[in-house]
Amino acid sequence: NLFWPRLKMVMDAHLRSIRGANAKKVGAGDIHAHLVSRRYAEFTCSILLILNRGRKVTGDGNVSELANNTSGKPSDKSSHRGSAGDMLVNDLDVMVEEIILLLKRLSDVHPANKKRIIFMINNLDAIITIFKERRVSGRELNRFSDLLVQQRELFVEEELLQTFSKMIAFVQQTETHMSGISAPRGARGVAAPADVVNPEVVESLVHEFASNWKSGIEQINRNVLSYFSNFRNGMEILKQVLTQLLLYYTRFQDVIRKVWRGKPPSFCKDLVSTSVILAEIKKHALSI
């Protein structure tokens, strides 16, 4: 049977092509999904289905497994033929890592870190979408899904730093300071505010957030809609960014309460209620 050896040759050719791909010659294009991602996903899904490691929709519309093997180990059942077929299973694992390395090389063409992250998210999402459309599951899909989660988390921080960098830096630095150093005590055993934070800086941050938070959320909404071509992916990322913003502001308010225990300063009247922010977040989430 020449089928499996021939398929092995095709796989080897694809691996060589991915490994030898030059980012500048291939061209990263813009921040949206690259053609190599779609080609990889389509090819891999075909191989997985041939090896009986995917899923298909039966006549009654239910999803059924072609083979109960998503561990990546060769099945006891005869799903492929000979050593060439066995090697295809291992080659798929290698190809996953090679396409990830290629995407990273392509992303490095973009000068800004934020654009590199967006590029990775769009390409990982494109691969995952094709896998799901083909009803293919297994550790290949899990690998890309885990990597997508990591890249989304990186994007969330990058996007928030664009508008709320001062507040975020203050929260992170002050929390570290308060947890690692015993603050001096005042006459009543309460930490002296000036020994923990600069009151003028805190007041400035309060007023700045009160003035800019709505326009900041609107800008985030516009950015996300323009960055991510997959509607569902963009919606999930927007919710994640806005939720993280709410968490940072909640931590900011907690810092103020801990520093000025029992006697909040006058500028606290300008703090925005978290319920107001949450209502705004819900409004944007529903409008997508």
Image: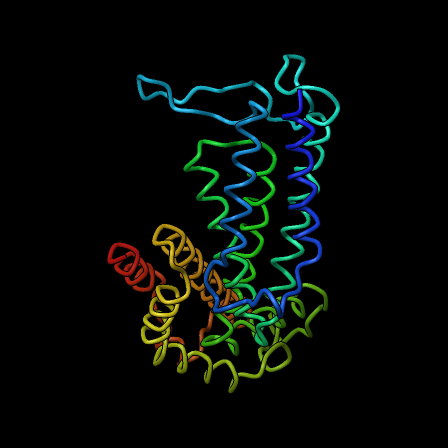
Task: In the displayed orientation, state which residue is furthest to the bottom.
Answer: 200
Q: From the viewer's perspective, is residue 170 above or below residue 80?
A: below
Query: Can you give x and y, in whole percent of width and height, for residue 71 in the image?
Result: 64, 26
**Residue 154: where, in percent of width, then height?**
56, 61
Residue 8, image quadrant: top right
Indicate the position of residue 199 as horizontal and vertical percent values. 53, 83
Q: Nearer the viewer, residue 157 or 115?
A: 115
Q: How many discs mark residues in the rendered view?
A: 0
Residue 169 horizontal/vertical position (percent):
57, 74
Q: Quadrant of residue 52?
A: top right
Residue furthest right in the image? 83
148 sits to left or right of 277: right
Picture residue at 64% right of the left edge, 46% below the top: 14
In front of the other: 108 or 13: 13
For the C terminus, give its image quadrant.
bottom left
Image quarter (top left, top right, bottom left or bottom right) of the N terminus: top right
Which quadrant of the structure image shows residue 102?
Answer: bottom right
Q: Which residue occupies the foreground of this view, 281 or 131?
A: 131
Q: Nearer the viewer, residue 60 or 287?
A: 60
Q: Residue visible at 48% across and 76% down?
A: 162
Q: How is the image coloured?
A: rainbow
Tell which residue pokes out farthest to the front in this image: 2
Residue at x 38% of width, y 54% of height: 230
Task: Give the residue drawn at x 56%, y 18%.
Answer: 68
Is residue 146 shown above or below 73? Answer: below
